[in-house]
Image (spheres, helix red, strand yellow):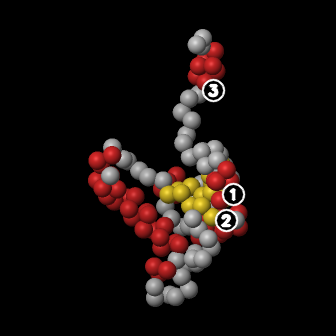
């Protein structure tokens, strides 16, 4: 849970490890290394993970997303940003924003894999 106490990028030029951007760079390295797959292999086969970033304001989400625009686009799907007031209400619904600052869509934490036709068919089946 981000409480806006950490800078996006450190103002101390010789120590980049102090900002949020550095932390996200570390997630990038962990994701590309696939070390997580080995570490958690006892619980299944993992191909990826999702970083959930929850904070207290839309402005903070916008600033953090903007500061991460230089990270690789191909890994942006592994990051979701949420507003604490929405996430606490129901974190499974469409309350999550993608990492790209130009992405205006909202995402579910768990994707609905059924098509509309499949859901309608399931509802029409007798019990």
Label 1 – label 2 distance at C-alpha: 7 Å
| Residues packed near mark 1 inside 10 Å, few (<14), some (14 to 19) or many (20 plus) | some
- Disc 1 and disc 2 in contact, CB within 8 angstroms: yes
User: Looking at the image, is mark 1 or mark 2 earlier in the sequence?
Assistant: 2
Residue behind mark 2: 56
Say above or below: 111 vs 19: above
Which residue is located at x 61 percent, y 24 percent?
Answer: 119
Which residue is located at x 68 percent, y 53 percent?
Answer: 86
Left or right, 97 with reference to 27:
right
Which residue is located at x 66 percent, y 59 percent?
Answer: 83
- Disc 3 and disc 1 in contact, CB within 8 angstroms: no
Residue 100, image x and y in percent?
60, 58
| Residues packed near mark 3 inside 10 Å, few (<14), some (14 to 19) or many (20 plus) | few
User: Looking at the image, is mark 3 or mark 2 earlier in the sequence?
Assistant: 2
Label 3 – label 2 distance at C-alpha: 34 Å
Q: Of discs 3 and 1, which sits in the foreground?
A: 1
Residue 62, image x and y in percent?
67, 65
Residue behind mark 3: 116
Secondary structure of residue under mark 3: helix
Say above or below: 84 vs 109: below
Left or right, 114 with reference to 36:
right
Residue behind mark 1: 85
Q: Quadrant of the N terminus?
A: bottom right
Whether residue 63 is visible, yes or no, is: yes
């Amino acid at each position: 849970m981000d409480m806006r106490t950490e800078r996006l990028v450190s103002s101390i030029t010789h120590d980049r490890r102090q900002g949020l951007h550095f932390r996200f760079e570390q997630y990038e390295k962990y994701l590309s290394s696939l070390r997580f797959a080995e570490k958690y292999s006892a619980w299944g086969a993992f191909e990826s993970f999702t970083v959930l970033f929850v904070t207290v304001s839309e402005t903070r989400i916008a600033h953090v997303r903007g500061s991460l625009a230089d990270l690789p686009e191909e890994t942006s799907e592994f990051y979701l940003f949420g507003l604490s007031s929405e996430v606490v209400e129901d974190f499974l619904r469409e309350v999550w924003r993608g990492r790209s600052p130009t992405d205006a869509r909202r995402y579910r934490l768990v994707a609905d894999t059924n098509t509309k036709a499949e859901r309608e068919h399931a509802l029409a089946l007798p019990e």
